[in-house]
Image (spheres, grey):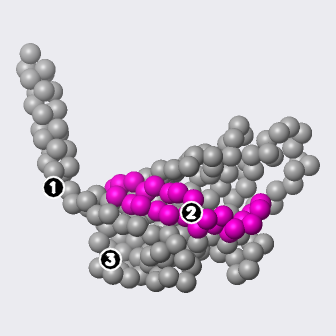
Amino acid sequence: MQLLTAKLMAFLMFTSCVLQDVVSAQLVQLHWYMHDTPFNGPSPSSIPVTAFNASDFQNEVNNFLFGQIYVFDDPLTQDSSLTSASFGRSQGTYSFVSREEIVGYVSYTVTIQTGVHNGSTLNIQGAAPSSAPLKKYAIVGGTGDFILARGIVTEELVNLFGPFNASATLSHHASVFLH
C-alpha cells in the first residue's frame, strides 16, 4: 500500500509540475515567407549534395526521389514578395525519405534578423508528404529569446514558378511556447 501511495504522490507531483509549465508558458506567434530557388535556377538557394542516378534502381523507388539530399540557405521575408522586408534566413537540409511516396524530411534553423526577436533562432524538423497542402513540423529548440522553445510550424505553398525543380514561395506560421 505504501508503494502505491508513493507512486501516486510522485505522479501527482509530476503532473502538477507539467501543468504549471503549460500554464506559465508564453505563446509567441510568428509568420514569414520562405523563398526557395533550386540549383538550376538563377542565384540558387538550394543545391543537391547527393548524386542520383535513376539507372541504379531496378524498381520504381526513383519515382519518389528516395535518397536525395539538399542543403539550403533561403531568404525569409515578411510578405510573399521576395523584394519585401526581410525577416531572416532559413538554413538547413531536406531529404526524400520514403520509398512509397514523395516525403520530405527537413531539419533547419530560422535566424530572425529583424524586430523584437532579432538575433534569435528556431530549430525546426520533421517529415511530411509533398502532396499534403498543409505541412506541420516540430519546433525543437532555439537560441536567444527562444531557448528551450517548443511548438509547431505549419507550411503552405503560396507560389510555384516553373516546372520540375521550380522556385517556390512558402508561407510559414509558427506557434512557439517559451519557458
Q: Is residue 6 left or right of residue 169?
A: left
**In the image as oriented, which residue stretches furthest toward the top?**
1
Q: Are marks 2 and 3 in contact (CB under 8 Å)?
A: no
Is the residue marked by circle 3 packed among few (<14), some (14-19), or many (20+) residues within 10 Å? few
Q: Position of residue 96 (x, y in %)?
A: 67, 51
Camera sees residue 34: yes
Q: Please name the residue that numbered disc 2 is placed on.
A: 158
Q: Please name the residue that numbered disc 1 is placed on.
A: 24
| First in residue order: circle 1 vs circle 2 | 1
Residue 113, placed above or below residue 108: below
Examine the structure image and report whether residue 100 is included in the region drawn in magenta: no
Q: Position of residue 90 (x, y in %)?
A: 52, 71
Quarter in which the C terminus is drawn: bottom left
Q: Secondary structure at mark 3?
A: helix
Q: Specify the quadrant of the image occupied by residue 42.
A: bottom right
- What's the amino acid at mark 2? Val
Highlighted magenta segment, given as a residue range: 148-175
Q: Position of residue 177 (x, y in %)?
A: 28, 58
Q: Is residue 137 left or right of residue 21?
A: right
Residue 50, placed above or below residue 105: below
- What's the amino acid at mark 3? His
- What residue is at 41 percent from the left and 76 percent from the top? 112
